[in-house]
Amino acid sequence: MIRILLIILLLFNSSFSKELQGKITYTEQDARIEAFRDLARQVPKEMFKNYLKDENVKENLQNLKNKNYIIEKEPKRNINPFYILNNIVLYSVEYVDDINKKYYYNPLGQLVKFEINDYSGTYPYRAIAYNRFGKVINITFVASETESFIFNKHEKLLGHWQYDQFYDKRGKASYTRILR
């Protein structure tokens, strides 16, 4: 009898641990709670005062035009363009030595917003966007490599990425992206 109980316990325990290793899914409400947990709604401007102007604006724009998104020259950085009608309207800069911060500039190299994320190698994590005055603009809760939720500062859902498709707050598919 004890052997049977031990076997049942082992079977239950192994199936339980497999369940815990599975993918965690989030509802909109679960994601909202996690996105706004202990959120700093404002950060000091000193945190980004050295990045109000992109010192490498000409080089970055040239690299973007050449589709070179990884800059090995110091300061090492990753850059990403944002387009409207094939024109760069915004680009981001992420420095290799500080990957938890990202700076967004207009084509003149002026800081539009900056983002702080709490990514530590695992999911989920948050990316909080702040304006030039250090106030929250929006929060992205990244649930996995393929899914994220975007909320405005008032905790309203702006949209939801699932794989390469963006769905607005009404569930209508709109933008697409290429996952690297």
Image: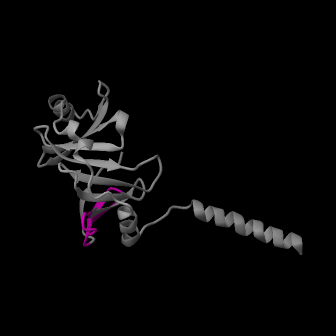
How many dots with numbers? 0
**What's the residue at 14%, 37% (across, down)?**
109
**What's the residue at 28%, 71% (across, down)?**
171
- The x and y percentages for residue 51 are 21, 38
- The answer to which of 107 and 95 lies nearer the viewer is 95
- The answer to which of 59 and 30 lies nearer the viewer is 30
**Residue closest to the far right:** 1
- The answer to which of 74 and 81 lies nearer the viewer is 74
- The answer to which of 15 and 109 lies nearer the viewer is 109
Q: Is residue 67 magenta?
A: no
**Residue closest to the far bottom:** 1
Q: Is residue 125 left or right of residue 71?
A: right
Residue 21 picture quarter? bottom right
- The x and y percentages for residue 134 are 22, 51
Q: Is residue 155 magenta?
A: yes
**What's the residue at 67%, 66% (across, down)?**
15
- The stretch in magenta equals 152-170
- The x and y percentages for residue 112 are 16, 47
Seen in the picture, residue 93 relative to 125 is either above or below; the reply is above
**Residue closest to the far top:** 73
Q: Is residue 132 left or right of residue 94?
A: left
